[in-house]
Amino acid sequence: MAWRFKIIVLFITVFILGILFIEELITYSVKLPKHGYKKQQTHLKDVPLQFEDTQTVATYDINDFVHPSQLPHSKENVTKQIDLKILDNNERKPIPWKSLTDDEFQVETDFDNSVKNVGHSEMTTERSALDIENEHHKRINVLHEACRQEENKRRGEQRKGNLTHFYYNKEHKFAYCKVPKSGSTFWMKVFMILSRGKNYSNVISSMSRREIHDRSYSLNVNPMHILRRNVPTVIVSRNPFSRLFSAFIDKVYLPLFWDKFGSMPNANVHRPYIVNTSVEVMKNSNKPISGRLLRFKDSLRAKGMLYTKQVKNLIQPICLNDVSFEDFLKFIIAEVKLGHALEPHWAPISHLCHPCRFNIFKIVKQETFSTDVEHTLNEIGLELDKYDWLKSSLRENRVQNSAPGIISVVDLKLKQRSIRNCITAEEATFRLWKAFQIQGFISDSIDIPQHLTVNKLFKNDAVTKAVLDAVNTKPLTSTESRKQRQAYLTDAYRSISDETLTEIQKIYYLDFVLFGYSFTPPS
């Protein structure tokens, strides 16, 4: 009898394992959802999704992509000009990463979230609701067709990509795939207000960008729940060319993350030194508190679950004063060839969100962000007029509101010994002023005030006042701002070599075809 019982148990075990194996095969299938992307077929059951920290990091091989001959870029259509070296007062000087920690990943100056909102009414002229709806249907059709045609490429890519965070709202039954450098801060505000009530907008309005990302971190859900339930998902796309240049200005050109880019070409690595510092540590794990628990740290400390620990940190000063935009692109290419996962701020969106697997029902484009967001929120049943603060946050001219925060971040970095040893207050001020011009905040016709270029110390108040005075003295319309940004973008890519451009086109191939962007460099 005992051997019969063992055989029965073994049979049942094998049967259950077989069912689980088949389920996993179905879950990880790269085919499009059986019912496509029709909203009426994708409603969820009223069951709360599991919150889970899911950050999948993998690698990919540049050889999985197309041969350079298949790409439209060639020597014939590129005008060679002097290398863009954006910096120094009288000459244009140019300008890496180690993997960022989860908390550091959230810290952005993200100029683009401010610039895209300038002159909202001017950017949304006379487009009927039907025109907007047709445009969104067209985007989804382009995505579906590209997913079918590029099935082999995307299969290889999604196995090697690094899936980002997904957020879900039960009431409106939709999800969002977080794409850094594409309006992610605004979407974090949306999910915080939807989960905690519109009165929470008073709390959000006083938060820094980092706090917004830290506190919204607990709202992310396991992407597999979104995939299995075929949840209608919003994704934000952006032209890879402009996204890369923006990441360069935001993360590399300004001295904010220099200590993370030791392998960047032309980086100047100095002798390391040790500093004593304190960190908040969880008692049960003896590890620093994670970003998702920061909002509970006072309560955790009161309960004896959190304590302050003195530690010694080895600081490796890395100076990137002479690093150019092409150096940054070559760094990305080298990382891919080494099989390293790219940092999310410049990883392909097709790697972060796997749009061919998820039920993408709206593609918000960074280029038409405000209009697309309003349309998308209306589609999911969220009446933006009932959320005054959220609506004003989307539409208002945020240059004046964002500039002081950006300047403060630079000010804090300059207080670090590792940065002070690399860059003077004068150069940092000039870079900041030029960055505001590159992003269309300050008119090119306004030179940096002379008194800012002779200060031996970085004066936050003086720089902030000068920037706001410049913005108010000659405010740029949305058209003027867009033209100025485009001029810098064009100039940046005009100086990039054919070989580098071809490799970048290969790495971001799926982003170009899935979201309908041209392979032709900005001109």
Image (spheres, helix red, strand yellow):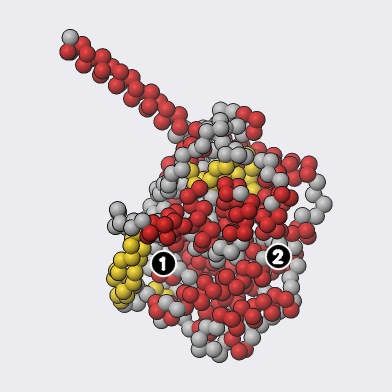
- Write down the residue under mark 2: 397
Residue most toward the right?
126
Closer-to-camera residue (366/213): 213
Task: Tell me: residue 19, above or below residue 327.
Answer: above
Closer-to-camera residue (295/94): 295
Task: Kindly tell me whether residue 200 is visible in this rendering.
Answer: yes
Q: Residue at x 29, y 69 (%)?
A: 311
Residue most toward the left?
2
Q: Earlier in the sequence, mark 1 or mark 2?
A: 1
Tag 2: residue type? Asn
Q: Residue at x 50, y 86 (%)?
A: 457
Closer-to-camera residue (77/352): 352
- Write down the residue under mark 1: 261
The image quarter containing residue 309 is bottom left
Tell me where residue 206 appears, x and y as whole percent: 58, 64
Q: Residue at x 64, y 48 (%)?
A: 364
Tell me where residue 466 appears, x and y as whole percent: 64, 81
Query: Callout 1: helix, strand or loop?
Result: loop
